[in-house]
Amino acid sequence: MDIESPKNDDNDNCCKPSSSCEVLSNSNSTEASDETPPDKLDTLNSKDDNISNMAKEDSREKIDFKVIYNKKKIDVTFALDGTVAELKAYLQNIISVPQAMQKIMIKGLAKDDQTLRVLGVTKGAKIMIVGSKLDDVLAVSIPTKQELVDEASSSNKEPLSQQKIHRKVLDKGVPEDVMPGILESQEPLPDYPLAGMLNKSGGKVRLTFKLEQDQLWIGTKERTDKIPMNSIKDVHSEPIHDHPEYHIMGIQLGTTEASRYWIYWVPSQYISAIKDAVLGKWCYF
């Protein structure tokens, strides 16, 4: 005799999606419920905003063009409505030139807030980049092997202006066009460049302090390097022994003393203002 097995309601029910399962599934979704804590709700909203911004950025029309830097041609694909400032930030890691030290030439010097579309950049266009790497700036001031030997042999207490490494510049005498130095005086930075000074190779140097841009411009006859002030590690200076109204000043661009960019015949009345401006302690007004 066949015995009919009793119906197992539990087995039947487990094979059917229950309303409680649906509720559990819904509760695990990314949609925030009325009971979602405020901090988690902010996180969800932030993620949604980021996704939206990424989608918006990715949807911008792109254009292919060439960037020319140091006689090298680099293929670039960039948003047509991207700004020059954004392009500089993008190129910073490609050409190893800090954003603040780049100049982009598109029918003249392009401004940071201009877009490539406004500037008339078309497919296949060539864009010129002018700028110096920090290593290039340092090359003017990095001592030779012999100079390092001379410096090491000098007494630590010996004034900079008495050291052989600096005498080759100082022995040429005070430059004719140097700004007057004033002893025992502290003056704020003027609204014009400090000029008439010399670098380690004996070339003329001028310093322009662009405080609103947080930059120090080191200008020579050949070029002007725009140095972000936050990249300067220190400013070292000492009076020149036989002309104390002037200083030798070392702008430290790296982590070692060898990375100092030496400048000679800096008027002593501006030394404090220079140090405070570069190191972020002095406010220009």
Image: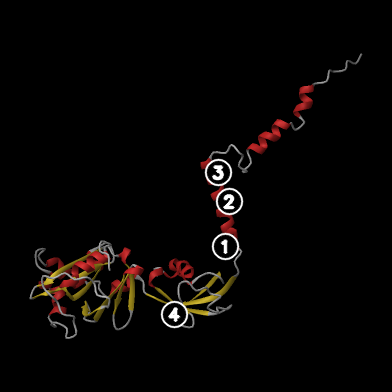
Q: Which residue is mark 3?
A: 41
Mark 3 vs mark 1: in front? 3
Pointers 2 and 3 in contact (C-beta within 8 Å): no
Image quadrant assignment for residue 178: bottom left
Q: Determine the CA span between mark 2 and mark 1.
A: 14 Å
**Residue at point 41%, 69% (across, down):** 99
Mark 2 vs mark 3: in front? 3
Of callouts 4 and 1, which one flags the residue occurring earlier in the amino acid sequence? 1
Q: Which residue type does callout 3 highlight?
A: Leu
- Secondary structure, mark 2, is helix
Structural crowding at the residue carrying mark 3, measured as other residues with C-alpha within 10 Å and reported as few (<14), some (14–19) or many (≥20): some
Which image quarter is the N terminus in?
Answer: top right
Pointers 2 and 4 in contact (C-beta within 8 Å): no
Q: Determine the CA span between mark 2 and mark 3.
A: 11 Å
Q: Which residue is mark 4?
A: 109
Q: Which residue is mark 2?
A: 48
Q: Which residue is mark 1?
A: 57
**Residue at point 79%, 22% (across, down):** 9
Image quadrant assignment for residue 184: bottom left
